[in-house]
Image: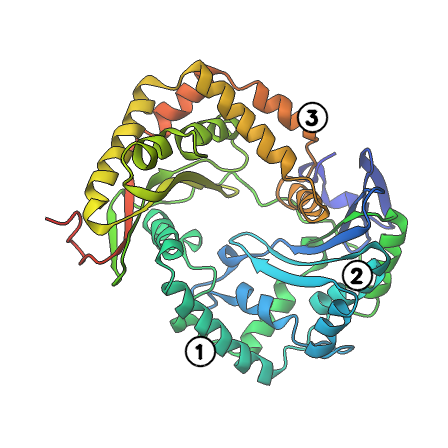
Amino acid sequence: MTATDRGPAERPARVSTRTLQDGVKKTVLPSGLRIITEAIPTTRSAALGVWVGIGSRDETPVMSGASHFLEHLLFKGTHKRTAMEISAEIEAVGGETNAFTTKEYTCYYARVLDSDLPLAVDVLVDAVADSLLDPSDVETERGVILEEIAMHEDEPGDEVHDVFTEAIYGDHPLGRLISGTPESITPMTRDQINTFYRKRYKAPEIVIAAAGNLDHATVVKLVRKALAGTPLDTGAAAPADPRPGDKRVRVRKPHTVVVHRDTEQAHIVLGTVGLSRYDERRFALGVLNNVLGGGMSSRLFQEIREKRGLAYSVYSYGSQYADSGVFGVYAGCAPGKAPEVLDLIRAELARVAESGITPEELVRGKGMVKGAYVLGLEDTSSRMSRLAKSELLHGDLMGVDELLTRVDAVTMVDVEKIAADLLAREPSLAVVGPFDEGGFPPG
């Protein structure tokens, strides 16, 4: 049974545990909080993550950046620990902690020796469940975040992807910066952040995942002990369903956005609306992406870098959300070469849209998808992330063999159809570099 099968009458009145796959177990607490673990006895480490199904797309324009703000603040102190104690306790055993925010979820994680997993559970759950959000810490982190936003603007190779996303989605929450803007971060009050924290960080929205040399029942006991007496130690509720994918996201008409920066390189992203993570065509798109710009053997890399030496970095990529997605091609090159690089990208996309790919490219593209996936599961952190994202985003866990089978099932026709659909669309263009608005391509 997946999360989407649950109904209100199926709220767990007691702890419910079941085996999902060999070595993988899932427990649902009465509060709706889920705990998923994978036992890997051959390792001497363990990775732990507290995943919250709340991200930047869940914010109002006034609260833009609140999820990222919280990411900073939850490590600043609880009723049990100061900020120094949170970091010192983990570092004293050689462990590491960190966090990140996306458009649809936020993750707080730690990696420690297997024997120190009880400490990691206590520290991480305490930080996420019972943070103080002291007013002085809010002001300190406000300054840190404003500096982070400014630093991001000094990295045009990163900024151009945000410009591209905004070009696609406009003022839709998916188009906003995860970090927020100076205009939204500067006036945001401690009470506003705390209200967002307590309204959004609810037990049914949380998945705690762990992978490594561990025992599932022990992890569950540790989590329940750490939750006791905190705001997340609540009454009976059903786990939240995965974010629905049946809504249509309004996008902007294809257009060009130029952001002037006095840089030595021009950074460009050309692309369009892509696929949602529920779209069955995503496996075919993964193959197509690798053929187009997924590695050194890809068409774009060979054509633009290897044959002509026009760019150091050129690649294609896709980002998938519950109800939408983007697909783009990035290149960084000398400003004077940007028009030629852009023409080559357009020509290659049109060629693939019209003629598809070769049988050899199909085989290579499949191999790249499968290899990247399997090799990416070689450490406890990636295994932990797989568990959490599968539960949080899909409501079930696809086995490795099943995923490889789905990739193997991709046919030439599948790739041709998705290429003809996506690559033939009129694209949007984002440019960051030494150009004036309306001055690209340069005359």
Q: Distance between the residues labelled 1 and 3?
A: 50 Å
Tell me which numbered mark, 1 or 3, is placed earlier along the sequence: 1
Nearest to the observer: residue 326 or residue 5: 326
Residue 401's disc is: 3
Q: Which of the two labelled residues, at mark 2 and mark 1, occupies the earlier sequence position?
A: 2
Instruction: Give the quarter of the image for residue 227.
Output: bottom right
Q: Which residue lies furthest to the bottom in this view?
A: 136
Which mark, by number, is residue 121? 2
Please name the amino acid that badge 2 sits on.
Answer: Val
Marks 2/3 in contact by CB < 8 Å: the verdict is: no
**Residue 204 place in picture, x, y as percent:** 71, 54
Of 222 and 373, the residue lying toward us: 373
Among numbered discs 2 and 3, the one appearing first in the sequence: 2
Q: Regarding mark 1 in the picture, which secondary structure is present there?
A: loop
In the orientation shown, which residue stands out farthest toward the left?
443
User: Which amino acid type corresponds to the residue marked 1 in the rendered image?
Assistant: Pro
Q: Where is residue 144 in the image (x, y as percent from the top left)?
A: 50, 75
- What kind of residue is marked 3? Asp
Q: In this view, does 275 lie above or below 54?
A: above
